Image: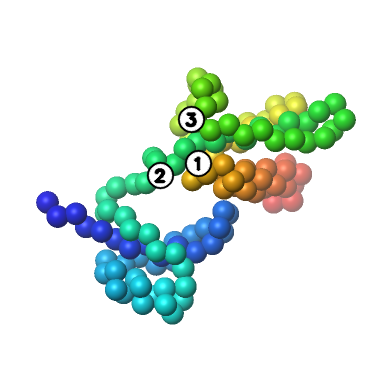
Amino acid sequence: MTKQIVYIITKGDYSDYHIEAVFLDKEAADKYIEVFGGDLGEWEAGTTKEVLKPYFTIDFEKDNNGKISDKIYSDYDDGALDKNFNGKESIENGPFCLRIVVRAKNEETAKKIAYDKRAQYIAEKEGFV
């Protein structure tokens, strides 16, 4: 069976990251990038690379003075994810900690995604969204 490769053009970073176009022909994808820009990725049709991205847990903690700090753990760390972890991105809120679990290609991207999700969570909680 012949593998079908698709060429994905993406743009943006973090919360603005999106698929711009998909091509079956690499030359057409290259021409698109020449005209419109973007980043080229090759994927085998019918597969997912999502499973290769690690999970990161970001804890936003508030101390007694109200100061917020963040700590990040990856699923490669022993015990970083709860044993009850359901394998999905999530937001959990406690009295002194907001825990956000995300999938990302690296720690820097995970933090940016978590900060976006934290801002959205706070805005929704305050009734701004």
| Disc 1 secondary structure class | strand
Local crowd at mark 3 within 10 Å, few (<14), some, or many (≥20)? few
Q: Which residue is at a point 39% across and 64% down the rendered structure image?
A: 40
Q: Which residue is mark 3?
A: 76
Can residue 81 be seen at all in this image of the molecule? Answer: no
Q: Nearer the viewer, residue 25 or 85?
A: 25
Number of numbered discs overlaid on the protein picture: 3
Q: Which residue is mark 2?
A: 50
Coordinates of residue 26 in the picture (x, y in percent): 29, 69
1 or 3: tag closer to the N-terminus: 3
| Disc 3 secondary structure class | loop
Disc 1 to disc 2, C-alpha distance = 8 Å
Disc 3 to disc 2, C-alpha distance = 16 Å
In the rendered image, the vertical position of residue 60 relative to residue 1, given as above or below? above
Q: Which residue is at a point 19% across and 54% down the rendered structure image?
A: 3
1 or 2: tag closer to the N-terminus: 2
Q: Which residue is mark 1?
A: 103
